[in-house]
Image (tube, rainbow, N blue to C red):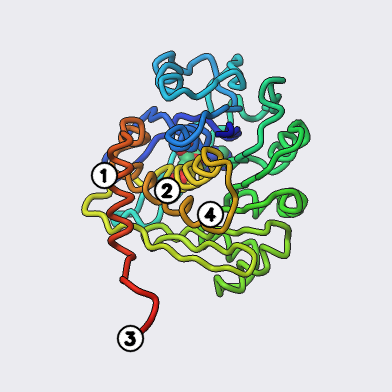
Amino acid sequence: MAHMLVVGSVAFDTLHIGGKEHRRVLGGSATYASLAASHFAPVQLVGVVGRDFPDSAIQMLRSHKVDLAGLEVVDGETFHWECRYADDLSSRETIRTDLNVFASFSPKIPQSFRNAQYVMLGNIDPVLQMQVLDQIEKPKLVIADTMNLWIDIKRAELGQLLRRVDMLVVNDEEARQLSKVTNLVKAAGILQEMGPRTVIIKKGEHGAMLFDGEELFCLPALPLHDVVDPTGAGDTFAGALLGYLAGKDAQSGAALRRAVVCGSVVASYCVAGVGPSRLATVTKEDLHHRFGQFHRLVNFHGDTLD
Ligand code: AMP
C-alpha cells in the first residue's frame, strides 16, 4: 500500500440549498478528497487554514488518519466560498470567494511527504499546483483537478501544468471550455494531447467517462432517491479514485476502471448530507454494499449478442 498526498483548499463554505442557508460548513477540495481517499490509503494533506479553524475539524480529519503535518495554520481567516444551488441541484452559482489565508499561500511540502508516489493536485491555482510538483521527488501518478476560474484567468499556466500530470479530472463544462470543442470525445482527445495520458470527464448525475490512452470506459452515476447537497462530490470522486490506486499501488487499465467505480461509490454518499457530514461517517460496509449495487446496475450478463 502506498501513501497518497493531497494538496487543495480547506475551507468554510456557505451553501444556499432549497431556500435554506448553511453557514460555516467545513469544505474545500483537500478536505473532501482526503476524507474520501482515507478509506483506501493513508493520506497526507497539504493546505492552509486560519486561526479560526476549529479543533473539532482537525480532530475529525485526524480520526480518519489524515496526516496533517502539511496543514499550515497562519494568522488570518480560513478560505471561504459561498454558492447557491438551483432548485433541481443540477447547477450552482458562486456568490463569493474570499481567498483569505489562501491569498499568500505558498505550499511547503514537509520532508516526510516528499517521496509521495500518488499525488492529487486538488483544485487550486495551477501555479501553486506546479510548486507542489517541484517539491515531490519522483511521483508514480499525478492527478490534477481544476475549475472554470483557472481556465479563464490562468490558461497558459494550466497548459504548463498539464504537461506534467498523468491524469486530469474535469467536469463536462470544464472539458469543453479547456478544449474549445463541444463533443466530449473530441474534447478528451484534445486534453490528452495537452499532456495527461488519462482524462476523466465527470458528468454529475450522468456519471463519468474515462479516457485512458485509446481505451474508453463509461460508468453511470447510481440513480439516487435523495440528493441533499452535491458540494464536494467532484473532489470526493477524484480523492477516492486516487486513494484506491494508491491503496492497491496499481495503475493497470483494470485498476483504473475499478477506481472510477470507487470514486462513484464514495461520491454517492457525499451528496447524501450537507457538506462532508455523510462522507465523514461512511463505513467499509457502506462501501461494499454500494459497490455491489453498482455491479448490479451495469451488469448485463455476457459479452455476446446471442
Ligand atoms: P466541488 O463541489 O467538488 O466542485 O468542490 C466544492 C469545494 O471546492 C468547496 O468545498 C469549496 O470550498 C471549494 N472551492 C470552491 N472554489 C474554489 C477555489 N477557487 N479554489 C479552491 N477551492 C475552491
Q: Any mark on residue 19, and which?
A: 1
Which quadrant is home to the N terminus?
Answer: top right
Which quadrant is home to the C terminus?
Answer: bottom left
Foreground disc of the pair 1, 4:
4
Residues tagged 4 and 2 counted as in contact (Cβ below 8 A): no
Q: Secondary structure at mark 2?
A: helix
Provide the residue designation for mark 3.
306
Sequence order check, earlier mark of 4 and 2: 4
Q: Position of residue 130 (x, y in %)?
A: 74, 40
- Say if disc 4 is inside 8 Å of ligand 1: no
Q: Please rate how many residues cluster around mark 1, counting C-alpha atoms within 10 Å: few if below 14, some from 14 to 19, many from 20.
A: few
**Seen in the image, is 70 located left or right of residue 13?**
right
Q: Position of residue 289 (x, y in %)?
A: 27, 46
Sequence order check, earlier mark of 1 and 2: 1
Identity of the amino acid at label 3? Answer: Asp
Foreground disc of the pair 2, 3:
3
**Seen in the image, is 234 located left or right of residue 158?**
left
Q: Secondary structure at mark 4?
A: helix
Asked whether 115 or 281 is in front, the reply is 115
Q: Position of residue 30 (x, y in %)?
A: 53, 34
- Say if disc 1 is inside 8 Å of ligand 1: no
Provide the residue designation for mark 2.
262
Between the C-alphas of marks 3 and 4, the distance is 29 Å
Provide the residue designation for mark 4.
256
Sequence order check, earlier mark of 1 and 4: 1
